[in-house]
Amino acid sequence: MRGNRLFPPGLFACLALLACHALAETSLERGERLFLGGQAPSSVSARVGPDDGVAVPLQSVACARCHGADAAGRSEGGVAAPAIDWFRLTKPWGHGFEDGRKRPAYDAGSFHRALVQGLDPSGNRLDGRMPRFSLSSADSGALFEFIRNLKDAPRTGVDAGEVRIAYPDMPGASLASGVMERIFEAASAGGGIFGRKIRLVPLRRGGAQVDFAGVVCATPLEIDRKEWGIDREAWIFGCSGSTIDSGFDKGLRLLATPAERVDMLREYARQRLGIDAKRIKVMGQSRVVSQPMAIISQNVDTALLAEIRQNTGLPWVLLAHGEILMGSSTLPEGFEHLRERTLAALPVPLAPAEGNYESLQVRLARGTASIVIEALRLTGHDLTAERLVQTMQKMTGISVQNLPVISFAPGRNYGLDGIHVAYWETNQWKMRENWFRP
């Protein structure tokens, strides 16, 4: 077969390949123009406001104007625009918001609906300040592809004059964050640590991302790093709750969790109370123990009360989550006949004056801030987020006001390897003893 004189053989194939390549480039470039607010395609328009809204220039409401050129979110004029980076949009577990609302991950279809109808993947209405766009699925697909290819800006939280530490800004966190902020400000005075000041920055659930070297949490509550957008490369320090997910090893805690304290109480019952291991009943475990001499439980619940009623003897009742009882002037209902045989494992010892329990949050905040400062000093001038957490993982024998000596060790990511046992007397908890693993 002879080739066309104007179009030699093979030229059609080359042109087809070049056309496909050009189309791919055009799609990505189109997404970039839409995102950054460059020259807008004539087929795309935007409206803002309720009902049909008011038409606005596309350039004035381009994604980058509110969410930032890096899609990491930002706050302007008192309005916080959330992050819309690829991780935040498409993480498999979805996203949770402060009002309890949740949504699954976005895909190309739900992303198009969000832009056109103002609805998230669950059908919830987006913020009323979010524009609604008239655009084709090809245009929204180009935007979605551009966000997927948008590289995350480096977030180290460290520069020549400052290191930024984030904290979860949750209800009840103001006391602890205020304590840590004052300690960090004192350490930053006179030039700071190796020329760097320490700045504490709030981290809000579902809010704009911030650039931080790590996260501190001084409340005795659990936090879910997924809900707060804390990825696996960030370290968390100070939480007493279980913040370490499977495969997530960049987390250190001052305190053992109640579940970890159950194991300590089992050893305590054997060594200090002289109870045979076969006579120790752990609530929630399937092993059957007839007539136990010690009952260990994380919580005071109906299952524990039923177990107590079934036993005609007088077993010891050992409560692993003792801090939930602090501040109460009475024993839990159903414990009256066991008042002399009820012990609570506290995460920290009671204050020196018996019965005068200093705020657990304040102690955790002091300990958390003090260890971060010491780690910064030990890490030295060549500071990175990775080096900082590596230093913390090796720290031993740290003395902090009103806390026992803190040490971390390989394979153990909490610093206080022991329990502080309290007993009930005269309508208050009093210290029995501090017990640490041999």
Image (cartoon, rainbow, N blue to C red):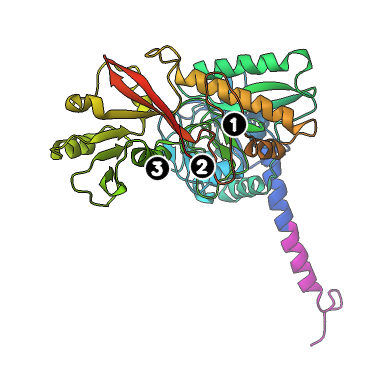
Q: Nearer the viewer, residue 409 or 83?
A: 409
User: Spatial distance from mark 3 to mark 2, Cα to Cα?
Assistant: 18 Å
The mark found on residue 14 in the picture is none
The mark found on residue 215 in the picture is 1
**Mark 1 residue type:** Val
Q: Is residue 218 magenta?
A: no
* Mark 1: secondary structure: strand
The residue to which callout 2 is attached is: 244
Residue 115 left/right relative to 258: right
Q: Nearer the viewer, residue 54 or 106?
A: 106
Q: Nearer the viewer, residue 186 or 76?
A: 186
Compare marks 3 and 2 and give the one earlier in the sequence. 2
Q: Measured from the top left, where is residue 67 in percent x and y? A: 63, 32
**Mark 2 residue type:** Ile
- Crowd tier of the residue under label 1, counting other residues whose Cα lies within 10 Å: few below 14, some 14–19, many 20 or above: many
**Mark 3 residue type:** Asp
The residue to which callout 3 is attached is: 263
Compare marks 2 and 1 and give the one earlier in the sequence. 1
Residue 264 left/right relative to 313: right
Farthest residue toward the right?
Answer: 5
